[in-house]
C-alpha cells in the first residue's frame, strides 16, 4: 500500500476501496466533488485509476 491508514481515514475512503490503487482514487474523488460529478471533467483521473485496477486484476489472476 502506498497510503497510510490515517491518510485513507482522512479522505473517508470506504474499506472496500482501500487497495493498491487507493492513491489514485482519492484525487479522482476530489475531482468528482469539485466538478459536481460531471462525467467529462475527470476523465484523466478516471483513466489512471481504472488502468491501475486493471493491472492489479491481471497481477491477481497471474498468481
Image (cartoon, grey):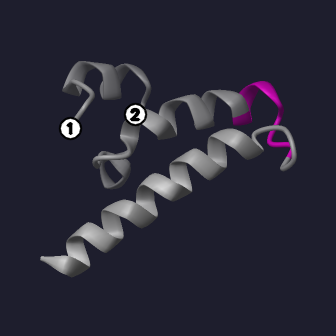
- The label shown at residue 23 is 2
Number of numbered discs: 2
Res 6 → quadrant: top left
In three-dimensional space, the C-alpha distance between marks 2 and 1, rounded to whole angstroms, equals 9 Å
Badge 2: how crowded within 10 Å, few (<14), some, or many (20+)?
some
Nearer-N-terminus badge (2/1): 1
How packed mark 1 is, by other alpha carbons closer than 10 Å (few <14, some 14-19, many 20 or more), is: few
56, 7: nearer the viewer = 56
Check disc 2 and report its element: helix, strand or loop. helix
Residue at 72% over, 36% down: 32
x, y percentage for residue 3? 27, 27
Q: Disc 1 marks which residue?
A: 1
The stretch of residues the image draws in magenta is 32-38
Q: Is residue 28 left or right of residue 21?
A: right
Residue at 32 percent of width and 61 percent of height? 56
Q: Residue furthest left?
A: 63
Residue nearest the observer in this picture, 27 or 59: 59
- Residue depicted at 76% across the width and 46% down the height: 43
Q: Give the label on residue 47, or none.
A: none
Q: Secondary structure at mark 1?
A: loop
Looking at the rendering, in which quadrant would you find the N terminus?
Answer: top left
Q: Does residue 51 lie above or below 48 as drawn? A: below
Asked whether 34 falls inside the magenta stretch, the response is yes
Percent x, y for residue 24?
47, 37
Does the segment drawn in magenta span residue 41? no
Amino acid at each position: 500500500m502506498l497510503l497510510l491508514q490515517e491518510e485513507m481515514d482522512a479522505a473517508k475512503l470506504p474499506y472496500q476501496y482501500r487497495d493498491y490503487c487507493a492513491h489514485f482514487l482519492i484525487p479522482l474523488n476530489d475531482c468528482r466533488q469539485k466538478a459536481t460529478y460531471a462525467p467529462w471533467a475527470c476523465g484523466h483521473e478516471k483513466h489512471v485509476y481504472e488502468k491501475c485496477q486493471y493491472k492489479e486484476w491481471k497481477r491477481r489472476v497471474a498468481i
